[in-house]
Image (cartoon, helix red, strand yellow):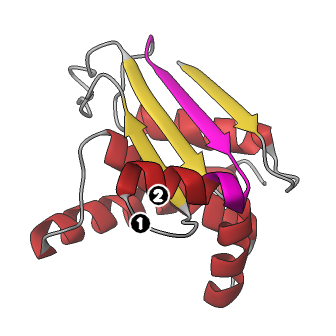
Amino acid sequence: MSVDVNNESDYEVNELEISSHANFLLRSLHINPASELSVMLVDEVSMAALHEKFMDLPGSTDVLSFPMDELRAGTSDKPSDEGILGDVVLCPAVAARQGEQAGHSMEVELRLLLTHGVLHLLGHDHEEPEEHKVMFGLQAELLAQWEGERNARGL
């Protein structure tokens, strides 16, 4: 899998950790190994511009997802089609504030947001109550699995 992480924000982030988490998500969701994902970290001004341009909403936000080939999660027997999953854009400044409010680090919040963004790329949504339940359930499951792997490796 090809995961490209590009930090254009003023925040220092562990790009290797973000890439590792993204690769974990793609493996866990049975995305074809030949697929591509881009993760970009931007400042609040850039995020606000994207938020307004693509969502027609004012101000900055935490995560935006831009799907490309409309891939869907595969199964252990049949991975997804090959293609470009798309772009996940994260805003560390917003993640830092949200993490503080939730009682955890910016890094934990960025993992949550990356997971959320990847699920959006795969067609998940949370507008309707049942969609919300499915998406947030899967998000929690993936984050718990990642923490389990990290703990097993002593990280």
| Residue at 52 percent of width and 50 percent of height | 50
Q: Which residues are magenta?
A: 34-46
Quarter assignment of residue 139: bottom left
Q: Mark 1 sits on what residue? A: 57
Whether 45 is among the magenta residues is: yes
Whether 151 is among the magenta residues is: no
Instruction: Tell me if I can see residue 137 in this picture.
Output: yes
How many labels were placed on the picture?
2
Residue 123 position in % (x across, y down): 24, 43
Residue type at the position of mark 1:
Leu
Crowd class of label 1 (few under 14; some 14 to 19; many from 20; radius 10 Å): few
| Residue at 72 percent of width and 84 percent of height | 100
Camera-nearest residue between 85 and 9? 9
Crowd class of label 2 (few under 14; some 14 to 19; many from 20; radius 10 Å): some
Residue 76 position in % (x across, y down): 27, 28
Residue 65 position in % (x across, y down): 43, 45
Of the numbered discs 1 and 2, the one sitting upstream in the chain is 2
Tag 2 secondary structure: helix
| Residue at 70 percent of width and 79 percent of height | 97
Instruction: Tell me if I can see residue 145 in this picture.
Output: no
Camera-nearest residue between 89 and 33? 89
Q: Quadrant of the C terminus?
A: bottom right
Camera-nearest residue between 56 and 71? 56
Tag 1 secondary structure: loop
Which circle marks residue 52 in the picture? 2
Q: Is residue 64 above or below residue 87?
A: below
Which circle marks residue 14 in the picture? none
Residue 132 left/right relative to 140: left
Residue 9 position in % (x across, y down): 79, 50
